[in-house]
Amino acid sequence: MKKMSAVLAAVSLAGVLCAQNSVTVKQKEYNGWKARDFSFNRQVEIMNSRNFYQFNLLQYQPDKNGKTETFMNLSAPRQEWGFGRMPVNFLSVTVNGIRERVLHLNENSFRTWTKPDSAGATVMLNFDGAAVIFDVFMKKDSPVLWFTFRPSEKQLTPIRSIRVTLSLVISRLFVKNGVTVWANAYNRQAQSAARKFEQRKESYLLGAEDQYLILSDSVLDGSGAGKGYGPSWLAFRMDDVQSAKLDLRNAWMNSVSFTLKPDFKIFRFGIWQRKNAISNQDFLALFEKEKDAFLLK
């Protein structure tokens, strides 16, 4: 009897450990602001023991002139600030001069998947015959939301140019006397593997040595009430990148853009933020402690 109890306990423990190390994925519909206005509505909710994300691929119903709009955003781990959907759509893709916002989506545009050590969704975007595919997913051992871009094997139109842009509101918007201040009130900064960046009007060119960006504000540092949510994180590889730039202005929104080589084979990056605020200092401690979980390998 004792032997049987020991076996059952071992099986139960193995099940708990397996659950802790797994990634789950659910395909849903976004049900937040203006949800009824969408003709195409897909959401993937991805979760592991470290974090969770909701990635949305959405298209408005045509207006009276037949015009529609397609966009991608995040509604979890939080909707506000950072890469969250309020007030930015964090991901933009432009191929051959065509932005994702004018694309029309169909049932082949989105599907979810699960593998032993990761889970997520695959998105296919067709830019007038030039098709780009990307996976958005989590790994079992990382709190980061990962992205992998690649060209479709079958192309009706060659890819002549492609740019991927990530936009965010670092920490939060600055509010003075109940009024949002959109510029000239911020203290934006960033840290890469190679150097520090201070806010300025001119863009910074990024190189392979930079590897990642910790994007923060020295005043809205996530340390307490009214101090925002703290840093956001971006990791990237430059293997098939033609050029990359960081726009770190004294303004409410900042961005990082990657111009890929037209014949690129793969482009990888990852973003991180969490539901609750974290101070600049505490994030640096977390990163140093769990660096392997944050970096692209």
Image: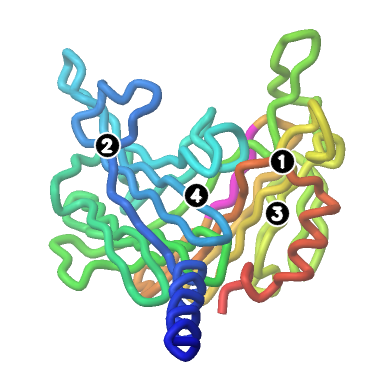
Q: Earlier in the sequence, mark 1 or mark 2?
A: 2
Question: Position of 147 compared to 232: left or right?
Answer: left
Labelled pair 3, 4 in contact (Cβ < 8 Å): no
Examine the image and state in which quarter residue 276 appears: top right
Front disc: 3 or 4: 4
Disc sitting over residue 204 in the figure: 3
The structure residue drawn at horizontal position 82% and vertical position 62%, both measured from the top left corner, is 285
At label 1, counting other C-alpha atoms closer than 10 Å, the crowd grade (few under 14, some 14-19, many 20 or more) is some
The magenta span reads 253-257
Lower position in the chain sequence, tag 1 or tag 4: 4
**Do residues under tags 1 and 3 come within 8 Å of each other at their CB atoms?**
no
Q: Nearer the viewer, mark 1 or mark 4?
A: 1
Q: Residue at x 59, y 40 (%)?
A: 168
Amino acid residing under circle 4 = Thr
Q: Kindly identify which residue carries mark 1.
A: 277
Dot 2 crowding, Cα within 10 Å, few <14, some 14–19, many 20+: some
Point out the tag, 3 or 4, that comes first from the N-terminus: 4
Relative to 284, 48 lies left or right: left
Is 261 or 65 nearer to us in this picture?
65
Q: Amino acid at mark 1?
A: Ala
Q: Residue 111's spot in the image, x, y percent?
A: 23, 56
Disc sitting over residue 165 in the figure: 4
Q: What is the three-letter code of the residue carrying label 2?
A: Val
SS category of the residue bearing label 4: strand
Label 3 – label 4 distance at C-alpha: 14 Å
According to the picture, the residue beneath numbered tag 2 turns out to be: 102
Alpha carbon of mark 1 to alpha carbon of mark 2: how far?
A: 35 Å
